Every structure is written in structure tokens, then in C-alpha cells.
Amino acid sequence: ADEFDYDVLVIGAGPGGYVAAIRAAQLGLKTACAESRETLGGTCLNVGCIPSKAMLHASEYFDAAANGSMAKMGVKVTPELDLDAMHGQRRESVKSLTGGIEYLFKKNKVTWLKGRASFEDAHSVIVDGQKVTAKNIVIATGSSVTPLPGVTIDQKVVVDSTGALELPKVPEHMVVIGGGVIGLELGSVWRRLGAKVTCVEFLDQILPGFDGDVRKEANKIFKKQGIEFKLGTKVTNVAVNGDKATLTVEPAAGGEASTIEADCVLVSIGRKPNTDGLGLEKIGLTPNNRGQIETDHDFRTSVSGVWAIGDVIPGPMLAHKAEDEGIAVAENIAGQHGIVNHDVIPSVVYTWPEIAGVGLTEEAAKEKGEIKVGKFPMMANSRAKTNHEPDGFVKVIADAKTDRVLGVWCIASVAGTMIAQAAQAMEFGATSEDIAYTCHAHPTHSEAIKEAAMAVQGKPIHI
Ligand code: FAD
Ligand code: NAI
């Protein structure tokens, strides 16, 4: 409409925002996207998913050479770490992918408004001193690191995930505060490159939100790899002295304090939605008590014309969830029916092996009704065994009456890739029998999903 500069203005060019902007433009809407960072792609491309995977992939090679698993297959090498080159390839990947989004914006005629956006009213924002108006405004401002009260992140001795991606040398002793996804992924990177890693987790198990068996098995595997865990433990103080830190920890339940010395401390206790400085008060939008912007199923906020997606709204803080919401919100703005099925959002930890799940945990499924569970160990999967990857399992959880698949959990080298078939099966309303009678190529890790489904029926072949 001519009364506005744009049909759609998206605030933030992360996986939520840039995808929303591209789809809106594809649907014929005049679209702009405000982004204050130097490059597009948000947390995910700049300091999140992509650079962390670049470091995980490269350090996996180093570890395979260093820990003897290559020698076991007849490839003897003594690895030498060139950390600068490793960081170089990480930066190259990030640069080419963020540049790719810029290309896609041009191709789709999305205007990039460079600068921070702040609301003036429900149809206008100020970006870089300029007022810009739009019929629809999508908030896709993402999230940032949750600070630990009393602990200053200096990005040298005490780092967050961004600092931990860029350490100029391998720490001697890295203490990771928080045994969640970031702590385990980035802890793994530096452990592989030679650091001693200690993980302090407040709860009595790592990886909250994951299936109970998966959490236990993952803990065992990481311990075997040399990560030390202090579970049920809280950090009460971090004192930095020069290039060393002393952490004071005590049992979460209360008890005697002790200290840990480290030359690197990673704070990874979660992320919080970005709403500061957005001028939400000017449009009468108040975040909930977790700081998130609430929306309805169509991603409409309580303010007409204002929508929100991604890490800034409730739900898992994942790039693919943000992307799917980006597509759905654009389609809804265009008058179509964009939907995201929040019950089927896969979640993957890119460690070695990978840890992945979709749908309900066994604990949550049990609370909802009677279930059947089938489990298959990767040790009995011919491909995993041949590749010398004995750790992990697949677990399929199905409704006892209808046999409908409610959740699938995997620990396997390629679990992140395997979980896509489980998500697709669940989207199609599959039963465990459907999976058990689907022909899977041999020899693949994915056969373990088929066998776990056969185990739900009580008749797996290879165990
Ligand atoms: P973001 O990606 O955070 O993007 C928001 C953008 O908005 C930012 O670029 C910010 O600069 C901009 N912005 C904010 N406010 C304003 C404003 N007022 N004006 C203009 N611009 C603004 N998820 C996965 O699914 N897989 C992974 O492997 C994975 N790995 C991760 C690893 C790390 C180390 C981290 C930190 C996160 C990881 N995540 C991963 C999470 C993932 O990065 C987020 O879920 C995802 O980026 C959320 O997308 P978003 O679009 O909602 O927000
Ligand atoms: P997280 O929520 O995954 O884990 C934080 C952990 O810290 C939890 O186990 C929590 O119990 C613990 N904790 C909280 N306060 C603590 C304290 N004071 N002392 C000790 N432990 C404490 O958060 P994380 O790892 O920071 O990651 C943030 C988000 O980024 C994730 O929730 C995820 O959505 C996203 N992400 C996704 C990745 C992926 O998909 N592979 C990779 C990295 C991040």
C-alpha cells in the first residue's frame, strides 16, 4: 500500500528474519529487513550454528588423528595443530554464507536497512536516524547470552560462546559452566584440541529437555572422552587474576564450597530474548516474565500489524524453528495459511557422536498415556560397527494403542541426519509399523531407526 514505505519490514536478519523477508518478497510484497550487524545471517551464521560446526568438524579430524582412531583403520599420522588455519577456514565458511544471504536479498529485492531499529508506533520504526514505515512489522531480533550474576565476560579468560569460538590458543584447563548444548559442543572442540575440560552443571544431569536415557548415555560417552563433570553443582564466584581464574563451586543443594583453577571459563547457561532498546513500550507490547514476546499460532502479537518469530518468542531456540516460523509468518501476512508444527521440531547436539531427538521424551510420553518403546544399540548396526562407532542407540516411542510414533531419540555419529526421517514420519502420522516395514538401504546407520521400530513390535532382527 502506498501509505507505507513497505508492505513488510522485518527487524533482524537471523534465520527467522532473513527467511521471512525472502519469502515475503517471493510472495510479491515490498520488503525491507533491518539488521545492525555488519553482516546478515544473525547469531546462527555469524557466531552460532555455522562457526561452531566449522570448529567441531575440523577438531573432529584432529581428534581422530590424535586419539588413535585413524591408526586403528591403518592410517597412521601424527597431527600437528595449526589453530590459525583452523580459525581461518571457520571465518571463510561464515563469510561465504553471510555473503550468500546478501546475494539472496539482492536477488529477491529485499532492501537491507543497515542499523538498529526501534519502534515509533505500530507501523513505523527508526533505523539509523531515519523513519521507515510498513504495513506489517516482524520482530525477529533473536537472543543473546544469559549472563551469570556477578561474573564479567571479558572474552579473554571468561568467555561466552562467541569468545569460545575464537580462542587464540588451546586452554590448559577450560571450565564450562552449564552442561547444555553450547557447553558440550564447544567443550568438545577444545577437549579434542588438547584442553582439559571440566563441566559444572547445576542440575543432576546434563542436557535438560532431552530423553532421560539419552542424557545418561551422553554423560557416559563424554566422560569416556575425558570431559570431567561436576553435576548438581553451582558456581558461586569467578575471580580472575591475570590470565587465570578461580571458580568457587558448591553443591546445588547446599554444602561445603571448593575451588577450581582454570585458564578459560565458558559461561553457557542459556540465552535470553533480545527486546531491549526496541521501543516495545511505544507500541504497548510487554514481554512475558521470561522476556519473550507472546504470539498466537499465526505469529501475531497482541498489537495489530506487529508479528514476531524465532528466538524472541517462546519455544526452542533453534535456527530451523526460526526459519520455519519465518516462512509461516510471511505466508500469513500474504493472506495464506502458514503453519509450524511445534510438536515436531528436531533437536541436535553436534558432538561426537551426535545426539538428536524429535517429539516427546519417554518421560513426557508416559505422562500422557500408555506407550511402547523400542531400542536398538548402534553396536548392533553393521555400518556403525564397521566404522568403529560402537556408542549410542536409537529409541522409538509409540502410542501403545494406536502405534503412532510419539518420539524418536538417537545417539549415533550421524544422528543429526538420521533424525530427519523420524521428523518426516511423524509429520505424516506414521506408526512404528510403517517405519519397520519401510525398506532402508543397507548398510546405513539409518537401519537402526528401522530396527528400533521393529523392536517396538517386539521383533527386531539384529538383537
Ligand atoms: P538471531 O539469529 O539471533 O538473529 C537476530 C538478529 O537480529 C541479529 O543479527 C541481531 O543483530 C539483529 N537485531 C536484534 N535487534 C535488532 C534491532 N533492534 N535492529 C536491527 N537488528 C537487530 N541452532 C540450531 O538450530 N543449530 C545449531 O547448530 C545451533 N548452534 C548454535 C551455536 C551457538 C554457539 C549459538 C550461540 C547458537 C546456536 N544455535 C543453533 C541457535 C541459533 O543460532 C538461534 O536459534 C537462531 O540464530 C535464532 O534465529 P533468530 O532469527 O530468531 O535470531
Ligand atoms: P542450554 O539451555 O542448552 O543449557 C544451559 C545449561 O546450563 C543447562 O543444563 C542448565 O541447567 C545449566 N545452568 C543454568 N544455570 C546454571 C548455573 N548457574 N550454573 C551451572 N549450570 C547452570 O543453554 P546453552 O548451552 O547456553 O545454549 C543456549 C541455546 O542455544 C540452547 O538452548 C539452544 O537452543 C541453542 N543452541 C543450539 C545448538 C544446536 O542446536 N546444536 C547449539 C548451541 C546452542
Image: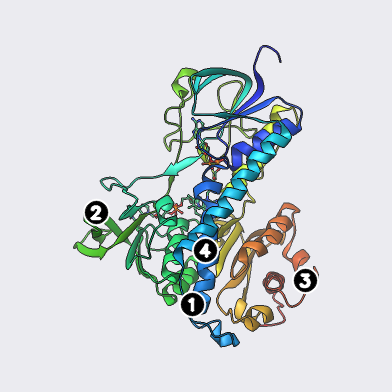
Residue 402 visible in image: yes
- Residue that carries the numbered disc 3 in the rendered image: 440
How far apart marks 2 and 1 lie (CA) works out to: 39 Å
- On the picture, is 207 further left or further right than 171? right
Q: Residues within 10 Å of mark 1 (few under 14, many from 20)?
A: few
Residue at image x 50%, y 33%?
Answer: 36
Residue 123 visible in image: no
How far apart marks 3 and 1 lie (CA) works out to: 37 Å
Q: Nearer the viewer, mark 1 or mark 4?
A: 1
Residue with the most extreme top position: 3
Residue type at mark 3 is His
Label 4: state its secondary structure: helix
- Residue that carries the numbered disc 2 in the rendered image: 236
Q: Residues within 10 Å of mark 3 (few under 14, many from 20)?
A: some
How far apart marks 1 and 4 lie (CA) works out to: 16 Å
- Residue that carries the numbered disc 4 in the rendered image: 56
Disc assigned to residue 79: 1
Q: Answer with the quarter of the image where residue 375 lies.
A: bottom right
Residue at image x 59%, y 71%?
Answer: 412
Location of residue 35 in the rendering, given as x and y in whole percent from the top left corner: 54, 33
Q: Is residue 224 above or below residue 105?
A: below
Return the residue nearer the eye: 432 or 25.
Answer: 25
